[in-house]
Amino acid sequence: MARIRTVKPEFWEDEIVGTLSPTARLLFIATFNMADDEGLLRWSAAYIKANAFMYDDDLTTSNVKDMMAELTEAGLLFPYRGGAAQQQLAMIVNFRRHQKINRPQRSKLPAPSLQNSAVRYLYGRRDGFICHLCGGDIAQQPTADDRFNLSIDHLTPQARGGSDHPSNLRSAHQSCNKGRRDRPAEEFEEPHSMRGSVNDSLNDSAHDDEPPNNNDAPSNHAPRESTQGDFFSLNDSVNSSLPNSLPEGKGREGNREEERKGSSSELAPLDPDPAPVREDVERLCQHLADRIEQNGSKRPTITKTWRDAARLMLDRDGRTEDQIHGAINWCQDNSFWRSNVLSMPKLREKYDAMRLQAERPAPGAKVVPIGAARPSTTDQRVAEGMSLAARLRAQEAAQ
């Protein structure tokens, strides 16, 4: 059943919302009405079309899927499967920051499973990686000192009937969560073992053997927000172009507000990227942005995360610029993949899946049996020189 919701004036000024197409922006507002009081809703294109765009005959379910992909790529909604039927569901990430619920009703939809590390990390990002029990910083990536690692605490303990739904969950330190047990949060006393800070723990770890460089791991810098702070995105590819902002909260050691004031002049510039500009990286990022815009979507912002993903594909994954260029053309020409690949990090993530699909023999095409004579060297060179998009066109012509 649809519910009465509110839209804040800041909605229209938010930079993350501004990256969405107008129809996706409208869909985001519609999800407020379709979601229950926990911010959970059914997330299938047919259901969304029937509820939000019932009078728009010119919009197809494929169009709706594109809009849904925009919202999830921006990190505004988190899709998942739940229940015995594994139905398609989604959670509005910061729903309770958007809406003040009067007499909230218990959700009938299953919540995202806390067994999923991505779900736990999502709640950590939602809460600014601040422990709700002691007010201290939580490590954004696992450290050797488990005290400061992320844990998800139930406001009403499960032993007392508390659920796994978003309104009952808060981020906490591992040690604080264990120290609280099933006692009321107001009776929590900080364990003596929590003396110190997460930064001390990280500094201690830095004196150990230096870990391998992992460009894919999340950093321990403060999470980025939009300037309004109400529509916080989990997607670095969108958020990395926005100014840094630290979450509100009272720290355990000193005045966190003074710390923010003292460091405000040292905030990194927009989209900081100390690496030298590489023409091959810029060409690939510009080409993907061009193709996304040509397909009718709002032109995405090319951020450091985009450039990092392109560099990793070239340097770590061993892809050539022609191969990546061909993959961009292929996915943006494909009705399914164009709605799923809307950023360079997503292109890198899905590259092998798309490559295997593109290389799948077309029906009726001749396949060389194992052990049979291979094509000549000349033919092989020609085949290797074909881009991903060119191979697909050859397959379609053979059908």
Image (cartoon, helix red, strand yellow):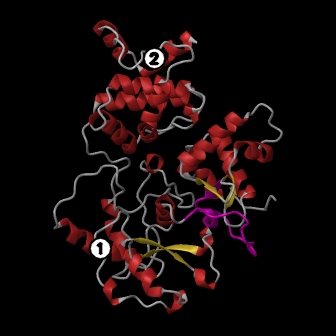
* 75 or 252, nearer to the observer: 75
Q: Residues within 10 Å of mark 1 (few under 14, many from 20)?
A: few
Q: In the rendered view, would you say 20 is above or below 250?
A: above
Q: Main secondary structure of the magenta part?
A: loop
> Magenta stretch?
88-113
Label of residue 391 in the image: 2
**Dot 2: element:** helix
> If the image is split into quadrants, where does the C terminus sit?
top right
Q: Quadrant of residue 184?
A: bottom right
Residue at image point 38% right, 44% down: 305
Label of residue 145 in the image: 1
Q: Amino acid at mark 1?
A: Asp
* 199 or 191, nearer to the observer: 191
Task: Provide residue 98's location: percent of width, then percent of height.
Answer: 64, 63
Q: Residues within 10 Å of mark 2 (few under 14, many from 20)?
A: some
Q: In the rendered view, would you say 242 is above or below 101?
A: above
